[in-house]
Image (cartoon, helix red, strand yellow):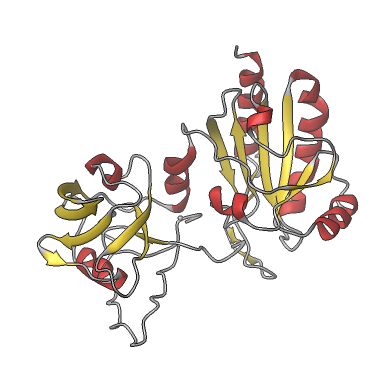
Amino acid sequence: MRSIIRFEGCAKGVALLSLLVGCTAMPEPKAQVGGGTTEPVAPSPASVAEEEESEAPPPIPRVSRGGWLGVEYGSTGAKEPGVRLTGVIPRSPAAKAGLRPGDVVIQIDGQPVSRPSDLVRLLSVKSAGDRVGIVVQRGPDQRLLAAELIGRPDRDRIMRMAFVGAKAPAFAELKPVQGTVPETLGALRGKVVVLEFWATWCPVCPALVPDMNRWHSTYAAQGVAVVGVTVDPVLMASRTAAQLEMKYPVLSDETGKTTESYRATALPLVFVIDKTGTVRDMMIGYDSVKLPELEQLVGRLVDEG
């Protein structure tokens, strides 16, 4: 019988091993609302944003898991009512309803929304299948939109909704650690890109190195770029890459901007990006079943025009 090994994540400095191992790379900078749930996105797009107010906000009620909207938000500031959307998960109820990043939610089903806790409270009583009326301020205009909530997807599906089939986010302020690789994703257009996010403190990440090394040696001549990205500083990343005998190019994301764009809050995280810059598949954590699937995909993408 073939053994199946799957490690997902790891809290920094801690590995919790059961059927899955959870590993969080860094605190999620945004909050996500899904019809009464505020669990992290990515894996899981995040915890509830702290409100910058002089008075403590009212306690957020215990929320249900019945319905999910699929937005990320932030406070508009003490003088502006409403909650500004900083992100909308593709193919989510929010996206289908026409909500956009930058919209300010000011009402849910006729009830005023003044701050993030209001948004959570009003959605917490909803369930999958419920329709909600959402009034947003978009520029000088107010719009009434209707969204039908769905059951909350699991962490992996939310990530897939956010990335697979969409253009890969651009690189931002990456520094070379080893190997030769452009510091912008656009410069890799025309190549198949295997993008791996890892960190020196991640106990699961070394398990991927032999596979990434083999893919690099096997497919580089066929136009495949295997690239590792870490938030660790250049010198630390360089030492670790040497210790782990990483043979493929590595970039340092000291600012964390690229890591945030790819929601790399659980490591290791691997994206397969086609020659047009579109994400075709991904793997969260180490999965011995998923890895061969990704390699087969890489082979097919090499043959695509």
Q: Between residues 112 and 28, which one lies in front from this camera angle?
A: 112
Q: Residue at x 67, y 24 (%)?
A: 191
Q: Residue at x 86, y 51 (%)?
A: 244
Q: Does 34 appear above or below 93?
A: below
Image-quadrant location for residue 234: bottom right
Q: Residue at x 16, y 47 (%)?
A: 145
Residue 271 is left or right of residue 85, and the answer is right
Regarding residue 7, the answer to whether it shows in the image is no
Residue 265 is left or right of residue 91, and the answer is right
Residue 241 is left or right of residue 51, and the answer is right
Q: Between residues 39 and 75, which one lies in front from this camera angle?
A: 75
The N terminus - image quarter = top right
Image-quadrant location for residue 52: bottom left
- Residue 63 location, x and y as percent? 28, 70
Residue 201 is left or right of residue 274, and the answer is right
Looking at this rendering, what residue extends furthest in the bottom direction? 55
Q: Between residues 45 and 291, which one lies in front from this camera angle?
A: 45
The C terminus - image quarter = top right
Image-quadrant location for residue 53: bottom left
Q: How many marks?
A: 0
- Residue 211 location, x and y as percent? 76, 38
Regarding residue 114, the answer to whether it shows in the image is yes
Q: Does 112 appear above or below 174?
A: below
- Residue 259 location, x and y as percent? 61, 52
Looking at this rendering, what residue extends furthest in the front direction? 140
Q: Between residues 47 and 154, which one lies in front from this camera angle?
A: 47
Looking at this rendering, what residue extends furthest in the left direction? 110
- Residue 80 location, x and y as percent? 27, 69
